[in-house]
Amino acid sequence: MAATLIDGKAFAGKVRGQVAEHVARLKEEHGITPGLAVVLVGEDPASQVYVRSKGKQTVEVGMNSYEHKLEADTPEADLLALIDQLNNDPAVNGILVQLPLPKHMNEELVINSIAPEKDVDGFHISNVGLLGTGQKSMVPCTPLGCLMMLRDHHGSLSGMDAVVIGRSNIVGKPMAQLLLGDSCTVTIAHSRTKDLPDVVRRADIVVAAVGRPEMVPGDWIKEGATVIDVGINRIERDGKNVLVGDVDFASAAERAGAITPVPGGVGPMTIACLLANTVTACCRAHNLAEPEGLTA
Ligand code: GUN
């Protein structure tokens, strides 16, 4: 394998360490403990695993974790009332409502009822607008994690050609905004893009976020390019369940200069960035200096 492996698991550990240091300083110097509230509606098994992991890691870095579990048939008005209560609770600096929500709930309405300064997912329409206009905002966790890894590997990204494959609101669009903010020339490619292989072959940076197992083959990758694989796809191979990304890792690693593996690449960075966003939100709420290197 020619490419350098970008170890997201190790990097996420480093980010959590920085968060923990900042949390310790907030406690010692200001008597403040940041708090993250996570709301889960219903019993989706994958969501339960995520929420448990978020709560555990929140406590591990020294922050307060507030978990709210609501029945799947909870009326939307009750969820909105809980969010209102959390919006007004000074001990809560970050609020995350785990998605997807049950079908009877309007996700947009729910997300936009979170106070923007506590929206640690960065999904509120105000944060989307602030990011799009280059203003201080809460930045979605997965693209923030990708940006941190790219900055760590390259230093400056200025002038690089970046292709983001996928146009979701959660990853593709905010990723493109962040790369633009770091002065990349950005192309957003998607299922209707013409000559996708040629578009990808021009890129110094490829971020794949489509959710299709191994759809990017190695021969689309420019020699020496950096490949960030956001995909986490469960497939059956040789009779076993395995996780693969959106990029064919083996062939891409032959050509890339650096590449993230799946698992152990982007995945662990998402919760680390959630913790980073919570400490950032806490500092902003108290007019204190933000932690360096943990924001966009
Ligand atoms: N469900 C899966 N990923 C996420 C995420 O990043 N945030 C929220 N709120 N829900 C999710």
Image (cartoon, rainbow, N blue to C red):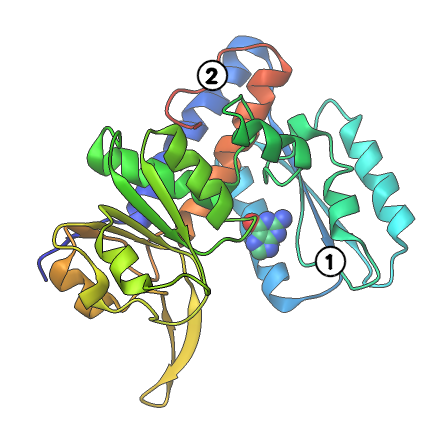
Residue drawn at x 33%, y 71% as measured from the top left: 214
Mark 2 highlights which residue? 25
Q: How crowded is mark 2: few (under 14 residues within 10 Å), some or many (20 or more)?
A: some
Q: Image quarter for residue 84? A: top right
| Amino acid at the residue labelled 2 | Arg
Q: Is mark 2 within 8 Å of ligand 1?
A: no
Secondary structure at badge 1 equals: loop
In front: 222, or 69? 222
**Residue 125: percent from left, percent from top:** 67, 36
Residue pictured at 49% horizontal, 11% vertical: 289
Q: Is 260 situated above or below 83? A: below
Q: Position of residue 83 (x, y in %)?
A: 80, 38
- Pick the front one: 18 or 207: 207
Question: Which residue lies at the image location 26% right of the left edge and 49% below the top edge?
Answer: 7
- Measure how far apart labels 2 and 1 are at the Cα level: 36 Å
Query: What is the residue that sits farthest to the front in this orientation?
Result: 194
Residue toward you, 38 or 134: 134
What is the three-letter code of the residue carrying label 1?
Leu
**5 with respect to 242 (left or right):** left
Is there CB contact under 8 Å for labels 2 and 1? Answer: no
Q: Residue at x 33, y 62 (%)?
A: 196
69 vs 240: above or below: above
Occupied quadrant, residue 151:
top left
The answer to whether one can see residue 62 in this image is no
> In the image, is 90 to the left or to the right of 284?
right
Q: Position of residue 247 (x, y in %)?
A: 31, 65
Q: How many marks?
A: 2
Above or below residue 126? Residue 79 is below
In this rendered view, identify the residue nearer to me: 163 or 211.
Answer: 163
Which of the image's four quarters has the N terminus?
A: bottom left
Among numbered discs 2 and 1, the one appearing first in the sequence? 2
In the drawing, what numbered circle is on residue 101?
1
